[in-house]
């Protein structure tokens, strides 16, 4: 009887205090998840480093002996121009002042345009490439976008006389007047056509000797393709444009 009583006492329910006490958080069983921001930064950094290590740097250093002071890398995301898998630099229509262009086509769901066209990604891509070049001993220009903003903030504001001179009408306007709405009834004419409008926003500071400039942006490009009927046609696509220039 005593043995049976002992077994029954061991199998009895625990006291109320023990049942309401939460279990101890020991080991890695209840590790909190990483916040969304940290996950996004980690994913973005890993993909950028993979692009630089796998595609950009091998092409860059293999063409150092070409003697061309400006190089451009045209990166096509995996979901852009999927019907044209064999595009090359020769298929780009009207691309002046670009130097030597290398076309890189990405693959996989991780390399879609939604990722590679983010402003934050573009800034980190250019910053990472600048850091890699600087670590290799190259003289690299700081972020030209920030330099332009700092220059604009430091420049003095025009005086009242200068402002009046700028806003005063010219002699031609006094004599002939300004064009009326009949010249452009829709008021939608854009006189910054083609690549000129894009290049106006680029930094204009002259690079020093052996100084390198890195720019990353999304650019609309026109490609000449051949249709199924054997006819030439043009298609437009937004691509990642990574440009490197060396001061000479």
Image (cartoon, helix red, strand yellow):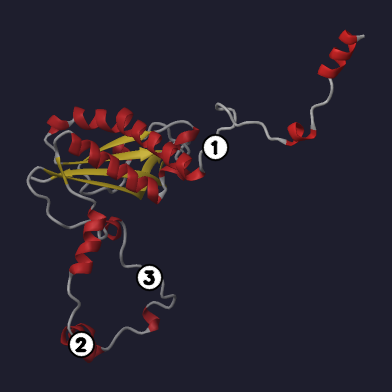
Disc 2, SS: helix
Q: Residues within 10 Å of mark 1 (few under 14, many from 20)?
A: few
Quarter holding residue 189: bottom left
Q: Please name the residue that numbered disc 3 is placed on.
A: 189
The quadrant in which residue 206 appears is bottom left
Task: Kindly identify which residue carries mark 2.
Answer: 164
The residue at 32%/35% (across/down) is 103
Is 41 situated left or right of 57 in this image?
Answer: right
Front position in the image: 205 or 225: 205
Q: Give the Cα separation between the discs numbered 3 and 1.
A: 53 Å
As measured in the structure, the alpha-carbon distance from the residue carrying label 2 to the one carrying label 1 is 61 Å
Indicate left or right for 26 with 111 as reference.
Answer: right
Which one is earlier in the sequence, the residue at label 2 or at label 1?
Answer: 1
Closest to the camera, between mark 3 and mark 1, is 1
| Image location (x, y in percent) of residue 142 | 20, 50
Q: Position of residue 114 (x, y in %)?
A: 47, 45
Percent position of residue 244, x then y: 21, 43
Q: Nearer the viewer, residue 92 or 111?
A: 111
Count neighbours of disc 2 (C-alpha within 10 A) and say few if under 14, some if 14 to 19, many if 20 or more: few
- The answer to whether the residues at label 2 and label 1 have Cβ atoms under 8 Å apart is no
Q: Earlier in the sequence, mark 3 or mark 1?
A: 1
> Which residue is denoted by mark 1 in the rendering?
33
Kindly report which numbered mark, 2 or 1, lies closer to the viewer in this rendering.
Answer: 1
Q: Kindly identify the residue that appears in the image at 18 percent across and 39 percent down.
A: 134
- Residue 191: image location, x then y, percent: 31, 67
Asked where in the image residue 18 lies, by quadrant, the reply is top right
Q: Which of marks 3 and 2 is nearer the N terminus?
A: 2
């Amino acid at each position: 009887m005593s043995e049976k009583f002992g077994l029954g006492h061991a199998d009895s329910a625990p006291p109320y205090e023990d049942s309401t006490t939460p279990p101890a958080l020991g080991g890695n069983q209840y590790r909190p998840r990483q916040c969304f921001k940290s996950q996004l930064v980690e994913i973005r950094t890993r993909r950028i480093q993979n692009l630089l290590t796998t595609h950009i740097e091998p092409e860059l250093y293999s063409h150092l002996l070409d003697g061309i002071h400006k190089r451009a890398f045209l990166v096509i995301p995996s979901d852009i121009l999927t019907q044209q898998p064999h595009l090359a630099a020769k298929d780009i229509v009207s691309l002046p002042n670009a130097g030597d262009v290398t076309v890189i086509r990405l693959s996989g769901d991780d390399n879609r345009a939604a990722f590679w066209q983010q402003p934050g990604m573009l800034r980190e891509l250019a910053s990472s490439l600048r850091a890699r070049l600087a670590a290799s001993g190259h003289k690299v220009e700081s972020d030209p976008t920030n330099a332009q903003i700092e220059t604009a903030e430091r420049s003095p504001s025009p005086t009242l006389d200068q402002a009046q001179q700028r806003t005063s009408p010219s002699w031609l306007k006094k004599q002939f007047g300004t064009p009326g709405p009949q010249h452009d009834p829709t008021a939608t004419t854009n006189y910054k056509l083609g690549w000129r409008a894009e290049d106006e926003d680029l930094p204009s500071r002259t690079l020093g000797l052996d100084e390198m400039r890195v720019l990353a942006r999304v650019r609309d490009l026109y490609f000449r393709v051949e249709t199924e009927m054997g006819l030439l046609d043009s298609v437009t696509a937004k691509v990642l444009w990574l440009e490197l220039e060396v001061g000479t």
